[in-house]
Amino acid sequence: MSAYLDNSATTRVSAAAVDKAVAMMTVEFGNPSSLHTMGHHAAQAVTAARRQVATLFGLPQDAASLSCITFTSGGTEANNLALFGAAAARGRRGRHMVTTAIEHPSVLEVMHTLEKEGFSLTVVEPDANGDISAGALADACREDTVLVAAMLVNNELGTVLPLREAIQKIRRRSPLAHIHCDAVQAAGKLPLKVLALDADSVSVSGHKLHAPKGVGALYVKRGVRILPRVYGGGQERQLRSGTEAVPLIAAFGAAVEALPPFSEQYAVFHALEAQLEEGLSAIDGVVLHRPQNRVPYIVNASVCGFKSETLVHFLASREVYVSSGSACAKGQQSHVLQALGLPKEQSDSALRISLCADNTADDIDQFLAALREATASLASVD
């Protein structure tokens, strides 16, 4: 039996999402822009999914709120659309941007690309625990700041950034700024309330919450202007032209609807986190990396004396699946752990264990047993 503990990389697609995708590929497979009945049914499926995904953002079901949601191919495209689109719309008002050192590459790479195109960039560093304060984010902003990008939950450490407080401060200091929130690791596991958060745009990804890969969504606040990156038939409110991926979009909606209540998820997360941390603390050489403000479903620990890649492969041979950090890094050293200023021994030996509500205590026991075996057998080889 396998223990899959890499849910921040991707999740198992739910049965409800699979069934919906298959139905939209084999029965209701029309183009939603077509005027005939098959097209109408496909368009209805997209609208239904938009209502379901609106609940991820904590939005009401009225037409005005639904018009704020644009379907994308995933979190990366949503981040790119928001940041490039906002920079294009506001670049004449100012040329300063702010982000954090612990953002996902789909944010950091955009910001560095814009920097090469003439924008100036301030990168806010975390403290030694991985936390970033609201004051630090606001203090980095200026009167000419036109773009701020900060994630809600970090994908490697589980840090929760105090964005609601930060955004209130940033609005006063930088009234021209478009504020974007990457909520990919929060959506479906934390109650998002984008109206109260007051971000200008928020991105989410389907495959992090039991939908298929290849679908995500971008919320853009009413009245906020961003410019499209893809032009064509004007689908998705003129922001993302191209025939909608109806099976993926409908499956996304079905996956959201099938998510357990937050109370049930957190009962699982807190119990498994406690079991994990107790077990890891009992293994020689393990150092836990615990931000003060963090979610319970991402645990990061270094197993000093062993390379992350070696441990990941050994655990996989025992059908235990974790990661050494962001899947997008493909084994490269984590920029997030580097930002913490960790000793190289710790950053080179870090493991990320990430949970979903389907995980069990047996999964954690299997992981801990395999890790103990790894430290014993790999050490004996040396």
Image: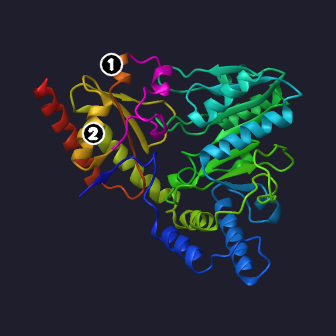
Residue 362 % position (x, y): 25, 54
Residue 12 % position (x, y): 43, 59
Quadrant assignment, res 180: top right
Closer-to-camera residue (38/68) = 38
Residue 214 % position (x, y): 57, 55
- Residue, far right: 92
Q: Which residue is tagged 1? A: 345
For the point 71% across and 21% down, the residue is 121
Callout 1: SS: helix
Position of 41 with respect to 365 (left or right) is: right
| Count of numbered labels shown in the rendering | 2
The N terminus - image quarter: bottom left
Asked if the magenta segment contains residue 16, the reply would be no
The C terminus - image quarter: top left
User: From where the camera sits, is residue 197 visible?
Assistant: no
For residue 47, above or below residue 137: below
Callout 2: SS: helix
Neighbourhood count class around disc 1 (C-alpha, 10 Å): few under 14, some 14–19, many 20 upward: some
Q: Which residue is tagged 2? A: 313
- Residue, far bottom: 37
Which coloring applies here?
rainbow
Closer-to-camera residue (379/158) = 379
Give the amino acid type for the residue marked by disc 2 in the picture: His
Mark nearer the viewer, 1 or 2: 2
For the point 46% across and 56% down, the residue is 265
Closer-to-camera residue (94/77) = 77
The segment highlighted magenta reads 322-343
Q: Magenta residues: mostly which secondary structure? A: loop
Residue 98 % position (x, y): 70, 25
Position of 278 with respect to 23 (left or right) is: left
